[in-house]
Image: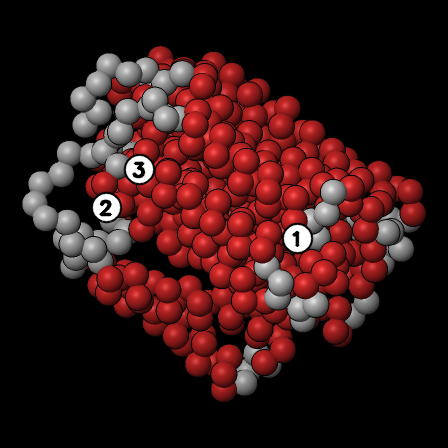
């Protein structure tokens, strides 16, 4: 229901990319500045870790809600809401003198990410077509997939030379710039009939289930896997998911329309996206192992993964071009397979000294090459397969898969690593932790092979989607 002949422009793409990067500035950079924030604000490490995790948790829980609202009330409007929340959240962090403003700011930043991500993908679908849409989504992917690495390095440099609060001042500047660049983009929303009723019940069940799963995975080892608390959390997790699916199936205005998953290309893109984001657990296992087991400094372990950043950024446009020549399925398969090989190389902990260091360096490069090749074909498959009136909601589910996959992958990998380390040596625990991520990549590859048809994402065949 665009009601306009407006065609997307490079200015619009730039504004959306700046909007997406604001998320990574406050999400990824925060991980690198823990000691500086702790010393400056004199907050406990536990409170700081909670503040860090709240952003991804709130983003993951509310991203589908925001995507559905974007379809109903306007995709540009929800993008602006997200950018305003980002500005307020960042401002609270700049003004923070202790834990309260820090935590409130992080919650607002999580909600801002939930609004920005699906609404901007939906705007790309609304105002770009065919090859131009694929090009626009490539730049969106550079902001999203590459933004993590870019802001990780930029955040470290800003914190070192200017002070950590300057990261969030830059985040505010980027958000204002994004708002200015997309100001001429017309509003876009779906054609709807009848009064919109929000699914509060579905949201409540979903939040309880996600919190229970998250606490069970992250705290299970400390609580004891067979303790009463862990058993209750496991029951609530499984029961919550089952109740949520049954409850949503009966709702006319469901929080998640499971009918979207009747579309096999969309399902393949979303499941493989969840699993490849779960492979992010490799980062925590490999970085911890090279420091604990091989004596690397934090700076040296960071240098080992620099090839990952370069590879992701360089391969995103390549993935787009490959998709236009071969369709989306092949680069998605190649990307998953290359990621799997790269991750597997990091599990060769029996190798001595320099040989293992080389394997980790090459492994990170292959990891980045694979993800970069996969990013645009997967995003385009999800967007192209979604009905026009539900593209915001579909994008929200797709990005929720990213957030939850990343959160669960890191939590599961860290838990496996620490559990095995308690009964064995650090080398074996690292190998088992890496194997967990190899399994994630392998299941991702299988889901693409089974669910994604051969011609999906091919510009020549897009009229058939």
Mark 3 = which residue?
Answer: 77
Q: Residue furthest bottom?
A: 228
Mark 1 = which residue?
Answer: 31
Mark 2 = which residue?
Answer: 259
At mark 3, the secondary structure is helix
Q: Nearer the viewer, mark 2 or mark 1?
A: 1
Q: CA distance from mark 2 to mark 3?
A: 26 Å
In the rendered image of this protein, does residue 239 appear above or below residue 356? below
Q: Picture coordinates of residue 185 (x, y %)? A: 33, 24
Q: Quadrant of residue 324?
A: top left
Q: Picture coordinates of residue 226 (x, y %)? A: 55, 83
Q: Is residue 135 left or right of residue 69?
A: right
In what quadrant of the picture does the N terminus appear? top left
Q: Quadrant of residue 465?
A: top left
In the rendered image of this protein, does residue 44 appear above or below residue 152? below
Q: Nearer the viewer, mark 3 or mark 1?
A: 3
Residue at (34%, 29%) from the top-left corner? Answer: 123
**Does the CB distance between marks 3 and 1 fall below 8 Å?**
no
């Amino acid at each position: 229901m665009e009601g306009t002949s407006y065609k997307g422009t490079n200015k619009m793409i730039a504004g959306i990319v700046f909007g997406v990067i604001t998320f990574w500035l406050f999400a990824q950079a925060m991980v690198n500045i823990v000691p500086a924030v702790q010393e400056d604000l004199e907050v406990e490490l536990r409170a700081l870790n909670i503040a860090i995790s709240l952003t991804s948790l709130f983003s993951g829980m509310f991203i589908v809600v925001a995507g559905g609202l974007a379809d109903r009330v306007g995709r540009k409007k929800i993008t602006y809401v997200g950018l305003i929340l980002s500005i307020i959240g960042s401002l609270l962090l700049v003004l923070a003198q202790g834990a309260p403003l820090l935590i409130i700011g992080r919650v607002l930043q999580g909600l801002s990410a939930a609004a920005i991500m699906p609404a901007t993908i939906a705007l790309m679908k609304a105002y770009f077509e065919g090859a131009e849409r694929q090009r626009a989504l490539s730049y969106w992917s550079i902001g999203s997939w590459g933004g993590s690495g870019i802001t990780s390095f930029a955040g470290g440099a800003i914190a070192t030379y200017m002070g950590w609060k300057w990261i969030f001042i830059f985040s505010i500047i980027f958000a204002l710039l994004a708002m200015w660049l997309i100001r001429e983009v017309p509003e876009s929303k779906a054609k709807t009939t009848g009064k919109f009723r929000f699914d509060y019940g579905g949201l409540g069940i979903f939040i309880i289930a996600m919190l229970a799963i998250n606490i069970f995975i992250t705290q299970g080892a400390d609580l004891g896997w067979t303790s009463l608390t862990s058993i209750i959390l496991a029951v609530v997790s499984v029961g919550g998911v089952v109740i949520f699916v049954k409850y949503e199936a009966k709702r006319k205005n469901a929080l998640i329309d499971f009918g979207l998953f009747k579309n096999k290309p969309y399902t393949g893109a979303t499941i493989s996206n969840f699993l490849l984001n779960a492979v992010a657990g490799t980062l925590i296992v490999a970085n911890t192992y090279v420091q604990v087991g091989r004596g690397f400094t934090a700076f040296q372990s960071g240098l080992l993964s620099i090839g990952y950043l370069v590879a992701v950024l360089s391969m995103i446009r390549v993935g787009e071009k490959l998709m236009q020549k071969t369709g989306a399925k092949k680069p998605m398969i190649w990307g998953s397979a290359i990621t799997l090989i790269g991750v597997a190389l990091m599990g060769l902990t029996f190798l001595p000294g320099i040989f293992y260091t080389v394997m980790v360096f090459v492994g990170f490069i292959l990891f980045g090459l694979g993800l970069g090749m996969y990013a645009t074909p997967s995003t385009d498959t999800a967007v192209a397969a979604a009905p026009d009136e539900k593209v915001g909601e579909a994008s929200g589910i797709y990005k929720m898969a990213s957030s939850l996959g990343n959160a669960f992958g890191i939590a599961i990998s860290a838990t496996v690593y620490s559990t095995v380390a308690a009964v064995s040596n650090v080398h074996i625990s690292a190998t088992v932790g890496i194997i967990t991520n190899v399994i994630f990549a392998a299941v991702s590859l299988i889901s693409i092979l089974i669910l994604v048809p051969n011609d999906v994402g091919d510009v020549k065949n897009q009229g058939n989607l």
